[in-house]
């Protein structure tokens, strides 16, 4: 049976991972809501991708610690994935590409004229 000191140490690690997860979540909320230039590398990814590291950090609290805190952290991450989307169709833009062909006769050139 593990001693009280080991349980306390494990509890501190689980709580620390939960706090790191929530700090990451706060930073991501600021980046996705503010759309700052210095956050461009973060917001290139769709919001649902950030569920993977977020839930990974919440997991130890869910399985080994206080399930309420783990459930609250997971709920916040899922709320982020749902509400932090760029637009309603932003997830579809990554799948569907634009297949329009270029205009053969641009507005500023006449057919048959040579452009230099």
Image (cartoon, helix red, strand yellow):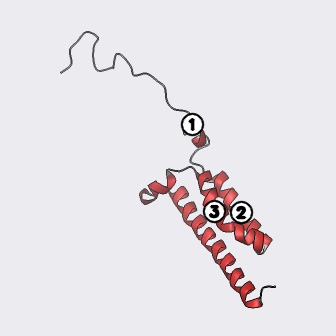
Spatial CA span between label 3 and label 2: 8 Å
* Residue on which the image places disc 1: 95
**Where's residue 52, x and y in %?**
63, 57
Spatial CA span between label 1 and label 3: 24 Å
Where is 57 relative to 87, above or below?
Answer: below
Spatial CA span between label 2 and label 1: 27 Å
Question: Considering only order in the chain, which callout, 1 or 2, is on the residue closer to the N terminus?
Answer: 2
Residue at the spot x=51%, y=53% of the render? Answer: 43
Quadrant location of residue 36?
Answer: bottom left
- Are dots 2 and 1 in contact, CB under 8 Å? no
Circle 2 Cα neighbour tier, 10 Å, few/some/many (<14 / 14–19 / ≥20): many
* Residue on which the image places disc 3: 54
Q: Dividing the image into 4 quarters, which one contains the C terminus?
A: top left
Residue reaching furthest to the top: 112
Q: In the displayed structure, does residue 34 sit left or right of residue 75?
A: left
- Are dots 3 and 2 in contact, CB under 8 Å? no
Quadrant location of residue 70?
Answer: bottom right
- Are dots 1 and 3 in contact, CB under 8 Å? no
Q: Which mark is residue 107?
A: none
Question: Considering only order in the chain, which callout, 3 or 1, is on the residue closer to the N terminus?
Answer: 3
Q: In the displayed structure, does residue 13 sit left or right of residue 31?
A: right
Residue at the spot x=33%, y=20% of the render? Answer: 107
Circle 3 Cα neighbour tier, 10 Å, few/some/many (<14 / 14–19 / ≥20): many
Question: Considering only order in the chain, which callout, 2 or 3, is on the residue closer to the N terminus?
Answer: 3
Circle 1 Cα neighbour tier, 10 Å, few/some/many (<14 / 14–19 / ≥20): few
Where is 93 relative to 42, above or below?
Answer: above
Query: Which element is circle 3 on?
Result: helix
């Amino acid at each position: 049976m593990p001693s009280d000191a080991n349980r306390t140490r494990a509890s501190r690690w689980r709580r620390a991972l939960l706090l790191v997860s929530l700090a990451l979540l706060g930073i991501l909320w600021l980046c996705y809501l503010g759309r700052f230039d210095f956050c461009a590398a973060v917001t290139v990814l769709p919001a649902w991708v950030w569920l993977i590291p977020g839930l990974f950090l919440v997991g130890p609290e869910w399985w080994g610690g206080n399930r309420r805190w783990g459930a609250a952290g997971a709920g916040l991450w899922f709320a982020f994935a749902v509400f932090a989307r760029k637009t309603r169709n932003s997830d579809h833009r990554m799948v569907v590409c634009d297949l329009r062909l270029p205009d053969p006769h641009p507005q500023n050139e006449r057919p048959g004229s040579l452009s230099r």
